[in-house]
Amino acid sequence: MAHHHHHHSEAASGDKRMVLAILVNVGLTFAQIAGGILSGSLSLIADALHNFSDAASLGIAAYARRIARRPSNAAMTFGYVRAEVVAALINYTTLIVIGLYLVYEAVMRFITPESVEGWIVVWVAVVALVVDLVTAFLTYAMSKGSMNIRAAFVHNVADALGSVGVIVAGTLILLYDWQIVDPIVTLAIAAYILWQAFAEIGGAIRMLMLGTPSDIDVTQLVDRLSGVEGVVDIHHVHVFAIDEQLAAMEAHVVLAEGHGEAAEAVKARLKELASKEFGIGHSTLELARHACCNGDDARKIGHAIRSSSKSGGHAHAD
């Protein structure tokens, strides 16, 4: 009961940090937009747009975090844990859209230059940087174990670097009247946003597509499981991530003659091996005394049979 209370308190504490981060980012967004309009700074308005996306991404992340804690039911037998993965995909997608929009705006500013009032840019960006650092402090610990929070955190880090870039741009405009530095900084912010988004979005897509976790070698897994005493063949292997913490596997296992009575012991050894060596926390194994299919039929439905693995073929996880 104490353990459950600890997790509940931890979740409640995390929710409060998320709400606080959302509020400070919404307030900052309005300040940056006002400053950008008064100063004529594209990079400051760009930073405001990105900061608004921070607030939105934090809101999406916080809502998904709450949904993910709902228990499983007849309609959602795996539960709602992947709500956080969906939220991460949404947030990375919005980052890409924002990045592309900023590229367009920067190119247009190169074509049609506009003057920028440096002091307003610098002071508003300094305030923005402070808020960005506060938000990073509030979300950093949670981002380590959650793709969802990590997506929101990437929004925030990109915004912090954007604020630094805006400060640099404003300072150079003040000192040297280098107006062209404004769209250059905007392009740099956009490049960083796009780089981060494309680097991270693949993980969310992979999980939603039931892809094999990147740290699990299915061919090696099949070879190790096939070597367990009493196992003749293992095929129809599917490995996927239920969420970031739990990898699952299902497979058909053909037992050797005389091991029928020891089937449960063989199954226990297979599950233990999969857990200890490959980090697979949930295994569903179907035991049989002969393969359910071979040859072309096996290849059509993505079976991974021991003979093909040993002859240089690859196991499939589908």
Image (cartoon, grey):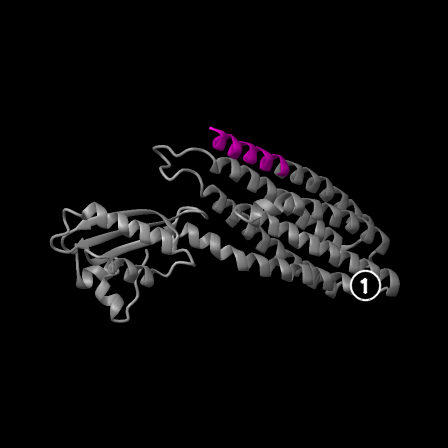
Residues 184 and 112: in front is 184
Q: Is residue 254 above or below residue 296?
A: above
Query: In the rendered image, is residue 303 in sight?
Result: no
Residues 230 and 124: in front is 230
Query: At x 70% / y 53%, what residue is drawn?
Result: 160
Residue 78 image position (x, y, % from top left)? 37, 40
> SS for tag 1?
loop
- Is residue 45 on the magenta stretch? no
Screen quadrant of the C terminus: bottom left
Query: At x 15% / y 56%, what residue is drawn?
Result: 256
Question: Bounds of the magenta span?
Answer: 1-17
Relative to 128, 17 lies left or right = left
Residue 66 image position (x, y, % from top left)? 52, 35
Query: Can you name the residue that lies furthest to the right here?
Result: 175
- Is residue 14 on the magenta stretch? yes
Q: Amino acid at mark 1?
A: Gln
